[in-house]
Image: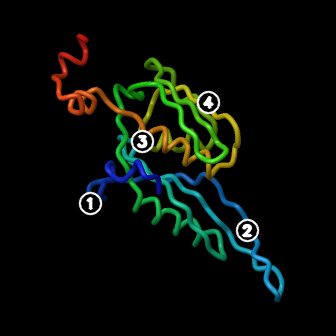
């Protein structure tokens, strides 16, 4: 998983209701001396739609097992994202491999303006209003990881105040 996620990890509690979204399933081929061995890889996003999200990758010989493995992997990698009034606290840019993403906060009622793989991550995290743009590679694996990286780099006002050692009043008044 991403290095930023270490301090934002979330433990699964009994009352947490997680919803999973399948981002993509790809057929993979391993060429051996005896011929070709076909398998499947699946990428899944899991979230409670209240600021907790995780991504997972599963590989297997059949599709359903690959999806189940991906869901289990995603549940082990849950992180908490700062969400302020249904949107993100500030604009953020992130890059993972060939994929680049830009996410911006939006006013209430805008909705999630994002493409397929980014939309799955943002909706699973519970972001209701956001503007998003993907540049570079549209590979779903890299796009999901870039989006999660951008979300992990977000900081809310309370965190900034604690890091600076000032009160919340001072943060807002300058």
Q: Is residue 135 left or right of residue 85?
A: right
Q: Is residue 163 left or right of residue 2?
A: left
Disc on res. 133? 4
Q: Does residue 114 appear left or right of residue 151 in this picture?
A: right
For mark 4, does the 10 Å Cα neighbourhood hold few (<14), some (14 to 19), or many (20 or more) residues?
some
Which residue, given by chain and number where applicable, does mark 2 sit on? 28
> Whole-percent x and y of residue 113?
58, 28
Looking at the rendered image, the disc whose residue lies closer to the viewer, 4 or 1, is 4
Who comes first in sequence, dot 4 or dot 1? 1
Q: Outermost residue, bottom direction?
A: 34
How far is mark 2 from mark 3, CA to CA? 30 Å
| Mark linked to residue 152 | 3
Tell me the distance, in whole angstroms, between the alpha carbons under discs 3 and 4: 17 Å
Q: Front-most of 169 and 88?
A: 169
Residue 88 drawn at (x, y percent):
41, 29
Which element type, helix, strand or loop, lies under badge 1? loop
Mark with earlier residue (3, 4) = 4
The reply to whether the C-beta atoms of the residues labelled 2 and 1 are less than 8 Å apart is no
4 and 1 marks in contact (CB < 8 Å): no
Asked whether, in this view, residue 89 is left or right of residue 169, the answer is: right
């Amino acid at each position: 998983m991403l290095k930023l996620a270490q301090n934002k990890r979330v433990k699964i509690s009994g009352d947490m209701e997680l919803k999973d979204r399948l981002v993509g399933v790809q057929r993979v081929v391993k060429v051996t001396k005896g011929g070709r061995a076909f398998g499947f890889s699946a990428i899944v996003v899991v979230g409670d739609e209240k600021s907790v999200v995780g991504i997972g990758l599963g590989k297997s010989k059949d599709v359903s097992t690959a999806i189940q493995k991906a869901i289990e992997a995603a549940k082990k990698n849950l992180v908490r994202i700062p969400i302020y009034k249904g949107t993100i606290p500030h604009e953020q840019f992130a890059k993972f491999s060939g994929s680049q993403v830009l996410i911006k906060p939006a006013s209430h009622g805008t909705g999630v303006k994002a493409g397929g793989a980014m939309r799955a991550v943002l909706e699973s995290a519970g972001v209701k209003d956001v503007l998003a743009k993907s540049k570079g590679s549209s590979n779903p694996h890299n796009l999901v990881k870039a989006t999660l990286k951008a979300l992990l780099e977000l900081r809310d006002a309370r965190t900034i105040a604690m890091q600076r050692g000032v009160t919340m009043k001072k943060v807002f008044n300058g």
